[in-house]
C-alpha cells in the first residue's frame, strides 16, 4: 500500500486500525509499511485517537510494538528498499538491528552478515560490547594498605597476627608467581 493513495484524511482510530492491520504481516515490506502507517496515523490523528488504537485493542499489538515498528520504519538503512531482500522478516530482529551503530550495520549489510534468515540472537554479535574495566592495581593496593594501617592502629594486640597474615599472603602470591613462571 502506498500512503499517497490514502487520499482522504482518516479521522477515526478504527479507520487507521483497518489500514494498519492489513499491512501487519511477516514480510519486511509490510513491517516497514506498518511502521510508516503508524507514524502517519500518529501525526494525523487528533489527540486521544492515537491512544485508542491500543486502549481499545484495535490493533493486534500494543504500543511498545508500535513504537518499535515506527523505529524500524524511521531507520535510514533498514527502511532503504535497497536492503529489503537481505533483511530478516521479523520485526523483533529488525528492531534489534536498529540498535547497531549505523557504520557497523552498513558494513554488516555490505559483507552479507545480515541475511533474511538471521536469528535475533545473532544481532548481539553486531552490538558494541561494553568496555571491560580493568581494575586499577595501584588503587586496590592502596585501599588494602589503608585498611591494614587502620587495623594496625586500632588493634595493637593483634599486630603479631596481622604481620603473620601479611607474610602468609605475600608467600601465597610469591608461590603463585613462581607457578605461573614455570608454565
Image: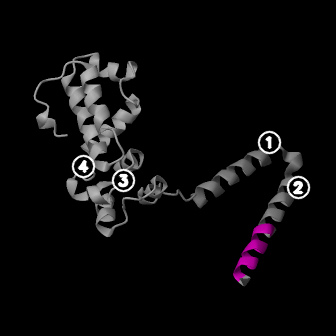
Which quadrant: the C terminus? Answer: bottom right
Q: Which residue is mark 1?
A: 154
Label 2 CA crowd tier, 10 Å (few <14, some 14–19, many 20+): few
**Real-space Cα distance between discs 3 and 4?**
14 Å
Q: Position of residue 179 (x, y in %)?
A: 76, 78
Q: Tag on residue 160?
A: 2
Q: Which residues are magenta?
A: 172-181
Q: Which quadrant of the structure image shows residue 12?
A: top left
Q: Tag on residue 79?
A: 4
- Callout 3: helix, strand or loop? loop
Q: Earlier in the sequence, mark 1 or mark 3?
A: 3
Which is more foreground, mark 1 or mark 4?
A: 4
| Nearest to the observer: residue 20 or residue 109 | 20
Q: Which residue is mark 3?
A: 100
Is the C-beta separation of discs 1 and 2 under 8 Å?
no
Q: Earlier in the sequence, mark 3 or mark 4?
A: 4
Which is more foreground, mark 2 or mark 3?
A: 3
Q: Earlier in the sequence, mark 1 or mark 2?
A: 1
Amino acid at each position: 500500500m502506498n500512503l499517497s493513495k490514502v487520499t482522504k484524511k482518516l479521522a477515526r482510530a478504527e479507520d487507521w486500525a483497518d489500514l494498519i492491520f492489513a499491512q501487519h504481516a511477516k514480510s519486511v515490506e509490510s513491517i516497514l509499511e506498518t511502521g510508516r502507517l503508524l507514524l502517519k496515523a500518529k501525526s494525523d490523528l487528533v489527540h486521544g485517537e492515537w491512544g485508542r488504537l491500543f486502549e481499545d485493542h484495535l490493533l493486534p499489538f500494543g504500543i511498545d510494538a508500535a513504537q518499535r515498528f515506527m523505529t524500524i520504519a524511521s531507520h535510514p538503512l533498514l527502511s532503504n528498499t535497497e536492503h529489503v531482500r537481505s533483511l530478516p522478516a521479523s520485526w523483533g530482529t529488525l528492531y534489534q538491528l536498529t540498535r547497531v551503530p549505523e557504520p557497523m550495520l552498513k558494513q554488516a549489510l555490505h559483507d552479507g552478515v545480515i541475511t533474511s534468515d538471521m536469528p535475533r540472537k545473532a544481532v548481539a554479535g553486531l552490538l558494541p560490547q561494553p568496555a571491560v574495566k580493568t581494575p586499577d592495581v595501584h588503587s586496590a593496593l592502596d585501599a588494602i594498605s589503608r585498611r591494614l594501617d587502620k587495623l594496625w592502629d586500632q588493634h595493637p594486640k593483634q599486630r603479631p597476627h596481622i604481620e603473620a597474615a601479611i607474610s602468609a599472603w605475600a608467600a601465597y602470591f610469591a608461590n603463585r608467581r613462581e607457578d605461573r613462571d614455570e608454565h
